[in-house]
């Protein structure tokens, strides 16, 4: 089977267009859009149907092997923290420490910390009631507070596993999960600050908006302590970070290092977080536990099938040897880390979902890593961070999270576009800049 360079690029572009059109115009679930894209590329270059199916099945299975447990456990941890009220306890603690005068900064920090284990849309819904009541109490516009909270949550959602996009990119690219969590967390801090800065700068120029109602989750009578609230979030991150330090080449392999390596496995670390999250609840009932675990499994299932379809698409691209066709391109080599950013940015802006954008981009970028000069362990880390930056921008009216923020904060569309959407542009560019600076030391 002889395929021209023009033919393979044409059908790759067509597949991307198919994904965008199906998910935006026709509201087709991303799983089916990605699966159809597999056949668009495969059939377009002359692959037999049986070969396409075999490659898709293999790609689906490989990414499930890498991610299924992490996604399910991460989702479970987030749901337990929501149920016990730990998220609101963490938020209240940070507000007390920063003072109501710095309420926007407190909400930004709250979003960042709560967002580590909880998906951004769920985190915003849970904390929106507190955010709106704080706006009434401090007379700070909900445009400022809402954007501060939203961007704090968004920064970690786009960069750090177990969030599905980042986790899928790590698995597809072959980066180290522990280092991604550790360095991704550090890179998310400037992104959070960029969102906070723009919320303060642009929000002050907008008309003051006060919430008309308080939404979200009502406060429980019995809430966990501050320690019980923070530990399920902090302990898994610390364990994963410790494993990364003990995994460096030349590190000792004594008994303590072996234990740390075991406990720092993301599956074990997240399991520890779940156990600690249960300590924050009172009077657990069998029916309640069963309901929460079922909800976690169902929510994770919807995420996993999208990630699996992304793995299938990546496997088909690998089977048509797209890397061989583009590998010798000097133009591609000169783009380096900017290529993953640009691909993800275009996909995100066009179809709205950060998760779908980064999963699709990872499938395209993976076979091109050698040509981009990013096939080393550090290069793979840079590639994932670059895609995370691209997946931040631009969040606008085709993004479900955009409407969650608008609905639960009461912001109008003009305010959302001028403040929140522009904030995501700054977040993506700042993260790209930090990633580029990091590449100067690592590559």
Image (cartoon, rainbow, N blue to C red):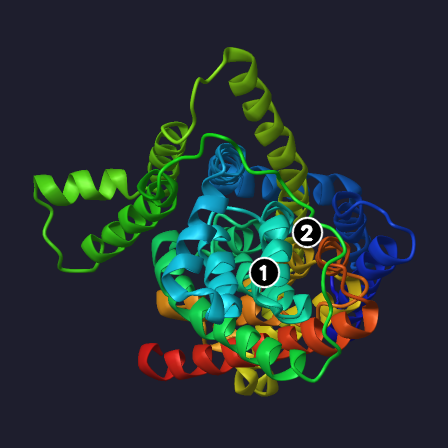
At a point 28% along the width and 44% down the height, the residue shown is 264
State the image quarter where residue 139 is shown. bottom right
Residue 137's mark? 1
Mark 1 and 2 residues: CB-CB less than 8 Å, in contact? no
In the picture, which quadrant includes the N terminus?
A: bottom right
Residue 251 x %, y %: 13, 56
Q: Name the foreground residue: 48 vs 11.
A: 11
Left or right of residue 56, residue 77 in this image:
left
Q: Name the foreground residue: 57 vs 121.
A: 121
State the image quarter where residue 346 is shown. bottom right
Residues at marks 1 and 2, CA–CA distance in whole angstroms: 50 Å
Residue 86 x %, y %: 45, 40
Callout 2: few (<14), some (14-19), or many (20+) C-alpha neighbours within 10 Å? many
Residue 385 in view, yes or no: no
Residue 3 x %, y %: 75, 66
Q: Which residue is mark 2?
A: 313
Left or right of residue 149, residue 87 in this image:
left
């Amino acid at each position: 089977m002889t395929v021209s360079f023009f033919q393979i690029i044409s059908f790759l572009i067509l597949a991307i267009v198919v994904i965008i059109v199906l998910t935006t115009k026709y509201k087709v679930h991303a799983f089916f859009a990605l699966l159809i894209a597999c056949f668009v590329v495969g059939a377009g270059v002359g692959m037999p149907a049986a070969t396409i199916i075999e490659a898709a099945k293999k790609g689906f299975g490989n990414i499930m092997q890498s991610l299924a447990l992490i996604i399910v456990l991460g989702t479970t941890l987030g749901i337990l923290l929501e149920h016990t009220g730990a998220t609101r306890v963490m938020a209240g603690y940070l507000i007390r420490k920063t003072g109501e005068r710095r309420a926007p900064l407190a909400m930004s920090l709250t979003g960042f910390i709560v967002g580590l284990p909880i998906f951004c849309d769920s985190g915003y819904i849970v904390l929106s009631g507190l955010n709106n009541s704080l706006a009434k109490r401090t007379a700070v516009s909900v445009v400022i507070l809402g954007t501060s909270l939203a961007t704090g949550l968004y920064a970690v959602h786009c960069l750090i596993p177990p969030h599905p996009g980042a986790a899928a990119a790590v698995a597809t690219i072959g980066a180290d999960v522990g280092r991604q969590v550790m360095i991704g967390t550090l890179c998310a801090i400037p992104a959070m600050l960029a969102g906070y800065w723009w919320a303060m700068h642009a929000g002050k120029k907008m008309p003051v908006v006060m919430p008309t109602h308080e939404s979200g989750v009502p406060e429980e009578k019995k809430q966990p302590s501050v320690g019980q609230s923070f530990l399920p979030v902090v302990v898994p991150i610390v364990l994963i970070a410790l494993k990364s330090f003990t995994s460096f080449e030349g590190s000792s392999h004594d008994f303590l290092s072996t234990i740390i390596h075991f406990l720092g496995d993301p599956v074990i670390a997240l399991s520890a977080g779940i156990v600690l999250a249960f300590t924050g609840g009172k009077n657990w009932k069998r029916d309640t536990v069963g309901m929460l675990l079922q909800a976690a499994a169902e929510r994770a299932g919807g995420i996993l099938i999208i990630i699996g379809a992304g793995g299938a698409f990546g496997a088909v691209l690998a089977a048509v040897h797209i890397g061989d066709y583009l590998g010798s391109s000097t133009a591609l080599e000169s783009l380096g880390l900017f290529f993953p950013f640009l691909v993800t940015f275009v996909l995100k802006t066009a179809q709205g979902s950060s998760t779908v954008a980064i999963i699709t981009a990872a499938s395209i970028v993976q076979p091109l890593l050698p040509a981009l000069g990013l096939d080393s362990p550090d290069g793979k880390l840079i590639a994932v961070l670059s895609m995370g930056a691209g997946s931040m921008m631009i969040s606008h009216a085709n993004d479900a999270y955009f409407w969650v923020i608008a609905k639960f904060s009461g912001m109008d569309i003009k305010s959302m576009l001028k403040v929140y959407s522009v904030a995501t542009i700054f977040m993506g560019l700042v993260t790209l800049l930090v990633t580029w600076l990091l590449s100067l030391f690592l590559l």
